[in-house]
Amino acid sequence: MNDRIEKVIDLKAPVARVWRALTDHEEFGTWFRVRLDGPFVPGQVSRGHITYPGYEHLRWEAVVQKMEPERLFSFTWHPYAVDPKADYTQESPTLVEFTLEQIATGTRLRVVESGFDRLPARRRDEAFRMNEGGWSAQAENIARHVEQKP
Amino acid sequence: MSSRSRSGAAALRSRASVFAALGDETRLSVLGRLAKGEPQSIARLTEGTRLTRQAVTKHLRVLEDAGVVRSVRIGRESRFTLEPRPIDEARDFLDLVSRQWDDALARLKAFVES
């Protein structure tokens, strides 16, 4: 089985614009739904809080890996670390990589998340619990965001 | 969320990672042979492959630990059968993560194109 997720999306915006949306911590937080304590710095831990309605009690934590301007941004994290009391630091994280490429209409963005083969099975339970009732709220969120910024 | 996934996920707790078990071409080929239906013996699973009996046994053990293969005793022989549920659950999990990325990227698209 594939242990990675890969997404490709074409954005009608210049590479520089997309790079800023990904790597400026405030811009990243706007679309990712997280309030970050400070800027992204390679090799350093990025901390903050989820702003997604219903999950505001959850912390965000990732370790920034690479920032190659307008080309590659990557971080490792513990996906769905949804139990505020649990210590996830001993678990293997997954790696998230954003790769940017200039195309005629703007930017082609590729997102790869890999390393699920090292994720403990019990973490999948938590993801399922988090999912319950969360998706309809998420869909409404997107609709609102899109309507506000046509 | 189906109840199948949740009750099954609880049963998964003590098992090795399904992803790790399936992340090997030889094991995938063994599973492919089991997917044809009938419980099969180690001798049968070794037939027509370049693998030794020991190698097949070792891979079956990993698959059994991950819960995706079950052995049944038929007479004096152990036969192996596919247990699809954990595989479905692992796939459901990836689907879930995948949908979250779809949603996040839709928000990113709206954000940079506005």
Image (spheres, rainbow, N blue to C red):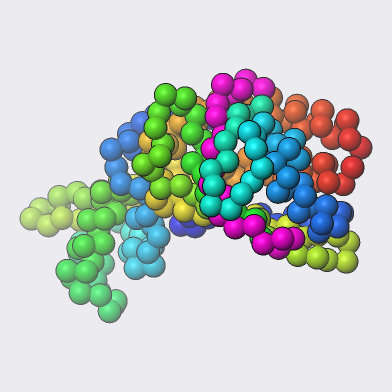
* Total marks placed: 0
Judging depth in this view, the residue of A96 and B45 nearest the camera is A96
Say above or below: A138 vs B30. Answer: above
Q: Does the stretch in magenta take in A55?
A: yes
Residue stretch in magenta: A52-71
Q: Quadrant of residue B23?
A: bottom left
Residue A102 in the figure: left or right of residue A89: right
Say above or below: B38 vs A87. Answer: below
Image point (37%, 54%), residue name: B20
Residue A22 visible in this rendered orientation of the protein? yes
Q: Quadrant of residue A102?
A: bottom right
Report x, y in % for residue A90.
36, 41
Report x, y in % for residue B16.
30, 46
Q: Quadrant of residue A89?
A: top left
Judging depth in this view, the residue of A29 and B81 nearest the camera is A29
Report x, y in % for residue B52.
20, 74
Residue B104 visible in this rendered orientation of the protein? no
Image point (34%, 63%), residue name: B27
Say above or below: B38 vs A139. Answer: below
Image point (29%, 76%), residue name: B49
Residue A42 in the figure: left or right of residue B30: right
Q: Quadrant of the C terminus of chain B?
A: top right
Image point (22%, 56%), residue name: B61
Judging depth in this view, the residue of A64 and B12 nearest the camera is A64
Q: Quadrant of the N terminus of chain B?
A: top right
Judging depth in this view, the residue of B21 and A27 nearest the camera is A27
Report x, y in % for residue A112.
60, 56
